């Protein structure tokens, strides 16, 4: 038996207002005046001077605003890398991603593709990256995805939705400033927070679980319960705790895997472009068979926060559409093996997946 | 307000038997055939082929067995560094520490002092290290100290017991193999485990606490309670959980600090050479005033495991001895500030510390 040797985020800073330290943190990493820092920022912060006025641009440094309305794509990474190469005199000193999972994953992928040849889609998979990425920093502004701590960057490509899993993917620096999450709209807060909750349920109920993953998963799950089902937290406490829950939830997956909800929601994202957080919720709502207690609590939390899920998103799909989603889902073998065990193919049939998708 | 930007261990591997991967993990880090790996190994493992036969020595690689009966000293680091420089053709490719906190701290300190001029004692303090350390790996064989994850290496010098706190101190690689702890004698298991428990109590009850430290501390504390006060764990489960408790307990101190037990036990170690684990227990046993609930549970755990603490270790000390211990203890200002608050000097008097020491 061989165990994964997990590469951790190199540095982490935590605290309300720690974002103010961003400039001081990156400054020593500037290679030279021709080698800029590129800030990839969620475009919800465009014209938000409370945040952007704290980014000091020097020399050729640049902010690129990016919409997170759609899931990140390999073609989008290719375009970003091309435009950065065209616009900069020398290879950038660093990429700083500021936003949710979409922006964090784009920052990771761009930093990898600036030093690796060819198309991004060729690196979707496990350990295909040859060269170290350039310095990259993650600043989450919404909590739950675990993208700030993971060794993957999940992208939709022409033939699959799959991460670039590599030792070079994790951030060199993460800034955890819970204050940056203060204006997240309620539904998005819930859906992205549930991504974290679902990570915990899938990790803790998976066959891959070991004590490392269990201790992180239980800690994260307790925090999630406190945040989404408790009564007594202030807004600030809830923001702080959800940021840590996301971090620990991400760590929990290091030695385990996600499971059924992720395997099915990747199919929805690929075909329908469903965003990851809401997609997970739409799927998880129908997974009593796999995670009875987890789904029960999920429904209670959904009710408590008056969250309505879209209904019938698969109502008008053709058989070929279902096949596409089922193919994507079944290709994620480690997720199924973690969820159901080595013999998962005996019970996880195309028919069963189609029935599940039809409920959504 | 400025927050610490914490450097994490670069890579971690967890699992029973993961020690078997040591050779494969370090091999790519060999600089050349003249640049050996030096293994610093606790001498309890001398002639223990179950462990040592799994260390492949190539070229000029060498095992140095070191006794952990005494706390590690700055002079010991100086001697080790000198002998390594004399014995090797080129600067080593890496230092691998295999043992408890003493061996881990020695490995960290030696790896720093191989690239930094002068005496080790000159680097005791905060951020005094100029040059990156050489590649260093930590393999704990007993759980509790948190040395595997911390950014310090605590050493007794000619004028103080204090850590080399620096960004270069944390390990580049940690191997967490709980199986390596299977033969730890019961008392040592308890005393070192209580180091972790006390980290949690001091962190969770400190004024420096934030949500980052709290989440790690609570996780670690739950694991400690399960291990030392629960009923249902197998030996293997308890080993696995204590290894994770130590890790999380160490992470909890990142944004907080230790407290009264550590501040007083450093005095004992400095004057009497008391080992850290048992020293903490001797002190903590008398700290109801500072940590009422924590001490109550400690006493219950001590009783459950039939552990006897030495009595009257300060009985024959002179006034000048007490002064020495009190000076060491009071010099650890961040520990007192964390434990008691900004105005700690109002209540933490020399008289009070002398009374406390006299009880021990």
Image (tube, coloured by chain):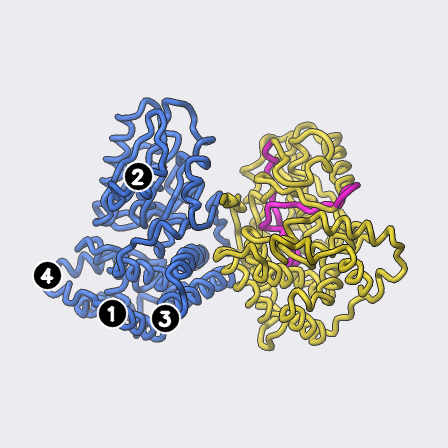
Chain colours: A blue, B yellow
Range shown magenta: B131-160
Reply above or below: A287 against A279: below
Majority secondary structure in the magenta region:
loop
Mark nearer the N terminus (4 vs 3)? 3
The residue to which callout 3 is attached is: A229
Question: Measuring 71% from the left and 57% from the top, which residue is drawn there?
Answer: B348
Q: Quadrant of residue A302?
A: bottom left
Q: Nearer the viewer, mark 4 or mark 3?
A: 3
Q: What's the CA distance linking mark 2 and mark 1?
A: 33 Å
Q: Nearer the viewer, residue A267 or B117?
A: B117
The chain to which mark 2 is attached is A
Q: In x, y percent, where is residue A258? A: 36, 60
Q: Give the SS element for disc 1.
A: loop
The reply to whether residue A253 is in sight is: no
B248 left or right, relative to A280: right
Residue A306 disc label: 1
The residue to which callout 2 is attached is: A40
Instruction: Say whether marks 2 and 3 touch (CB < 8 Å).
Output: no
Instruction: Say whether marks 2 and 1 touch (CB < 8 Å).
Output: no
Q: Is B151 a magenta residue?
A: yes
The residue to which callout 4 is attached is: A318
Mark nearer the N terminus (2 vs 3)? 2
């Amino acid at each position: 038996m061989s165990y994964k040797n997990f590469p951790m985020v190199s540095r982490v800073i935590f605290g309300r207002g720690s974002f103010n330290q961003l400039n001081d943190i990156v400054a020593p990493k500037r290679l030279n005046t021709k080698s800029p820092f590129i800030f990839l920022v969620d475009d919800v912060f465009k014209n938000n001077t409370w945040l952007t006025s704290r980014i000091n641009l020097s020399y050729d440094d640049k902010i690129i605003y990016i919409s997170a309305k759609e899931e990140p794509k390999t073609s989008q990474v290719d375009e970003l890398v091309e435009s950065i190469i065209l616009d900069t005199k020398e290879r950038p000193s660093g990429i700083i991603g500021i936003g949710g999972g979409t922006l964090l994953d784009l920052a990771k992928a761009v930093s990898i593709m600036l030093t690796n040849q060819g198309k991004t889609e060729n690196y979707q998979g496990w350990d295909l990256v040859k060269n170290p990425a350039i310095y990259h920093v993650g600043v989450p502004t919404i909590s739950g995805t675990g993208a700030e701590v993971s060794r993957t960057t999940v992208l939709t490509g022409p033939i699959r939705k799959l991460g670039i899993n590599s030792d070079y993917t994790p951030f060199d620096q993460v800034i955890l400033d819970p204050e940056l999450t203060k204006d997240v709209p309620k539904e998005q807060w819930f859906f992205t927070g549930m991504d974290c909750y679902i990570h915990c349920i899938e990790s803790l109920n998976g066959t891959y679980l070991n004590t490392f993953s269990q201790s992180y998963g239980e800690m994260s799950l307790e925090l999630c319960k406190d945040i989404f089902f408790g009564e007594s937290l202030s807004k600030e406490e809830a923001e702080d705790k959800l940021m840590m829950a996301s971090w620990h939830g991400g760590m929990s997956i290091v030695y385990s895997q996600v499971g059924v909800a992720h395997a099915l929601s990747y199919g929805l994202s690929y075909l329908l472009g469903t965003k990851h957080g809401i997609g997970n919720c739409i799927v998880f709502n129908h997974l009593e068979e796999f995670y009875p207690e987890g789904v029960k609590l999920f429904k209670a939390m959904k009710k408590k926060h008056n969250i309505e899920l879209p209904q019938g998103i698969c109502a008008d799909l053709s058989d070929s559409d279902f096949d596409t989603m089922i193919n994507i889902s079944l290709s994620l073998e480690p997720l199924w093996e973690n969820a159901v065990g080595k013999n998962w193919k005996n019970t996880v049939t195309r028919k069963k997946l189609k029935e599940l998708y039809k409920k959504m």
